Image (cartoon, coloured by chain):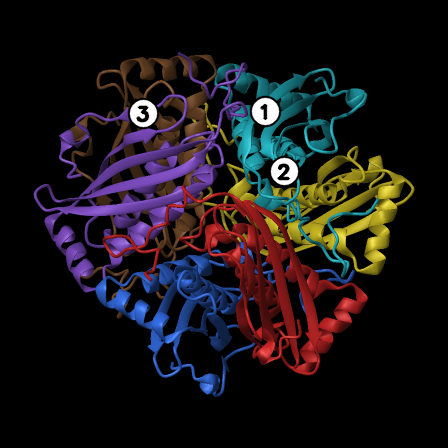
Chain colours: A brown, B purple, C yellow, D cyan, E blue, F red
Amino acid sequence: MDLTHINKEGRAKMVDVSSKEDTKREGIAAASIYMKRETLEKIEEGRIKKGDVLSVAQVAGIMGAKSTPQIIPMCHPIMINGCDISFNLDFENNKVDIRSEVKNTGKTGVEMEALTAVSIAALTIYDMCKAIDREMVISDIMLIKKSGGKSGLFERDEYNGKGNSY
Amino acid sequence: MDLTHINKEGRAKMVDVSSKEDTKREGIAAASIYMKRETLEKIEEGRIKKGDVLSVAQVAGIMGAKSTPQIIPMCHPIMINGCDISFNLDFENNKVDIRSEVKNTGKTGVEMEALTAVSIAALTIYDMCKAIDREMVISDIMLIKKSGGKSGLFERDEYNGKGNSY
Amino acid sequence: MDLTHINKEGRAKMVDVSSKEDTKREGIAAASIYMKRETLEKIEEGRIKKGDVLSVAQVAGIMGAKSTPQIIPMCHPIMINGCDISFNLDFENNKVDIRSEVKNTGKTGVEMEALTAVSIAALTIYDMCKAIDREMVISDIMLIKKSGGKSGLFERDEYNGKGNSY
Amino acid sequence: MDLTHINKEGRAKMVDVSSKEDTKREGIAAASIYMKRETLEKIEEGRIKKGDVLSVAQVAGIMGAKSTPQIIPMCHPIMINGCDISFNLDFENNKVDIRSEVKNTGKTGVEMEALTAVSIAALTIYDMCKAIDREMVISDIMLIKKSGGKSGLFERDEYNGKGNSY
Amino acid sequence: MDLTHINKEGRAKMVDVSSKEDTKREGIAAASIYMKRETLEKIEEGRIKKGDVLSVAQVAGIMGAKSTPQIIPMCHPIMINGCDISFNLDFENNKVDIRSEVKNTGKTGVEMEALTAVSIAALTIYDMCKAIDREMVISDIMLIKKSGGKSGLFERDEYNGKGNSY
Amino acid sequence: MDLTHINKEGRAKMVDVSSKEDTKREGIAAASIYMKRETLEKIEEGRIKKGDVLSVAQVAGIMGAKSTPQIIPMCHPIMINGCDISFNLDFENNKVDIRSEVKNTGKTGVEMEALTAVSIAALTIYDMCKAIDREMVISDIMLIKKSGGKSGLFERDEYNGKGNSY
């Protein structure tokens, strides 16, 4: 199987999907951001009080899902039908787990939108906490599930092998 | 120490940096994308021929560095002075290592620009190879070095503990 | 009735509209910008000569309608079918009345696009006249009419109670 | 005094500020969104629980301040140094009062950034509550204070004449 | 026939296309950038080595096609189905010929997307080579073919009259 | 002399300008759009009435100058100090000549901003007139003058050799 994004001259193109049918599609992705316990506790406190770091990360993630075609060069423009992002504070492994669910009806799927959403949510958490913790690490950005379209269902086995709490 | 991005009502604000001085600053970040050996070989072939997947990822990463303040809600607008991204194909661990170097002269630093650049470069690699490998995982997004500004030099020890080849 | 933009954790989400049908929709909104009589006269002069302030406001409003999903976090991406903006100089009350009409065919409506269009048109008038009048006030931004979709027709009674001349 | 945004042909231009000096500047703006009492109560409940509508409006307003030069055609690009937005629920007049403070160091001021921030925050509140209240009205968008630059200090007298609670 | 982008007041509007049907459409455009022979040779060398100038121009052109509705004020938002750009080095006339093919399914066509793609690809070539050649000239930006929609097929006769090698 | 936008691996980078000094800079660019005489007359009529096609093109060009760093991948972010665009209807050669003047104070110049401004103004004219004339051709996009910075003054000789009326 070949890399479909490459044209005859060996350079990138945006693949033609004109002949694909519009189907209902869903993409689910995950990411984790590892941090000092102290940082995690600050985030939790904030959430109990007025919920700020995660609220901002959530808005950033949703807006990131919408701007995916502007950010990822070969992505098709897509009109997403919905996007939800949730967070889980994992005190056992000192990390925040992030999960996105994106839906659309169209000729191409929303895997990239789901992956971009969790990535930007994680970067936003980094940004808002970096004054107290520069050593945070964002890891385990992965596709959990994808449905709809000709290639059908994809589900990741044991995706939480690295401790993702979802 | 408190989370500086939170105002008196407990909600987010963009911190006032008016009284900070303009200094020369640099940020270096890294990320890795793990994949099937077959996928890594396809990318290498491509590079030998006309270099496409990584060329596109590089453009995406540089444009991502520039659009960081539009993507990350509390980031200050910044005029970056330069941005370089490089890639290393690691056949021992079946991954591509990505490294960004961003420079600016200003009141705030370019950590987020460097981290956003490697994240978007990695997402672009995912996008261009996902037709042949949906199980790729993006990990180890981290700040390697930061210089300039009041908080001074930050350098990550042993950042390549997880096998990042830089 | 609940706020539909809030998820189970109490944070914002973009509502899933996958199961909604595509229907023809229309949104009409209004706004007014109050100013000194001298400012209004300058605008009129300009219009008689070569029409500038309002022409720029009109372009800004139309581009604003198109960028609504990038500006308003929980708005669904929409492909608007058309957008028209008109202005009325009201010398009785020393204000400019702005009216937008936006149309689309889709799963969600264009209320926000119509409201964003008049808001940005008004802000543009402020920007272009602020050198001679800093005390202008933008008011009465409201939805006049909305048709299409499951919730059906909405028409505002007496919307011009505050003197909007449309 | 003439409209400075108009060139010799009578069309718009972006005024040349090359010879202006960089000074510290500040802009403060206000807006109010009038609504049904029931809507205001829903927002307050939300805030007590996990604060969502206003958190999203705040992020939208801050990002709006940053994107002002992309939205308002003749606005100069500006690097804002900081931005804070606050909200006051006014149960006497059934409205939410919004106030923004924006700072920069540069050749032009941040009046438009402050005005755009409150406008977009208000539009976001409308968007998130429109399912339960389509008759909300956004009004009293005005500049409260502006300092720095050649034109010096501007402060609005009696700006809260219409009941703005700040 | 009248200019359809102008409303009753003589100002611009985005034409209403609600009643148009969705059809498959295609747009093909061309452009050329004339330069010193030395510059053309540098580009070719680059391409033979690792292909950079043209790879960057290609990514820029494709992203430009996607952002056309944000750049061209009265353009309708469109979801393009695919986009390919190719380059031909013409050593006889010392120029690079650029050709774009864009496809969509929708109520309006992709002429502007195709024209914007080649324009931005050409500007990117200028940007990357301007350190060695400031006198490059971009010319012959034109629509080659357009199919689909009510106005039907358009094909340019003798479009290569000026030496475009496609 | 080498292409400065290419890094050691042969791929693109954004050149580091940290050590350059801030100087006052100016860029002037030109473009022409050739059309049927009938189209040119329609534009002139429009201008006499209320000036629309060229007003919209002017706003588009100015906004294009501001968004150059988002559109052209390796361009440095720049805060332009001013931008003016003018048009000349050339009935001898049936074309519209477009001229932009852009100014900034910074480490890099505004050649690309000036060139992008005239290109987008020309594309906007095409868009607004294409319903009556699909065969328009945009040509002669070139840098006329550039001042400031280490490379000093550049002025194009005989730039109007092809009939540009400026």
**Distance between the Cα atoms at labels 3 and 2?**
31 Å
**Do marks 3 and 1 both belong to one polypeptide chain?**
no
Q: Nearer the viewer, residue B70 or B84?
A: B84
Quadrant for the N terminus of chain A in the image:
bottom left
Is residue E48 depicted above or below D12 in this figure? below
Which of D33 and B36 lies nearest the eye of the viewer? B36
- Dot 3 falls on a residue whose secondary structure is loop
Label 1 in the same subunit as label 2: yes
Q: Which mark is residue B153?
A: 3
Instruction: Note whether residue F61 is visible.
Output: yes
The residue beneath circle 1 is D85
Q: Which mark is residue D107?
A: 2
In-image side of D161 versus C149 (left or right): right
Q: Is residue C108 above or below residue D32?
A: below
Task: Look at the numbered disc 1 and give the secondary structure of its residue.
Answer: strand
What amino acid type is highlighted by mark number 3?
Leu
Image coords of residue E57 (percent x, y)? 38, 62
* Parent chain of label 3: B
Circle 1 marks a residue in which chain?
A: D
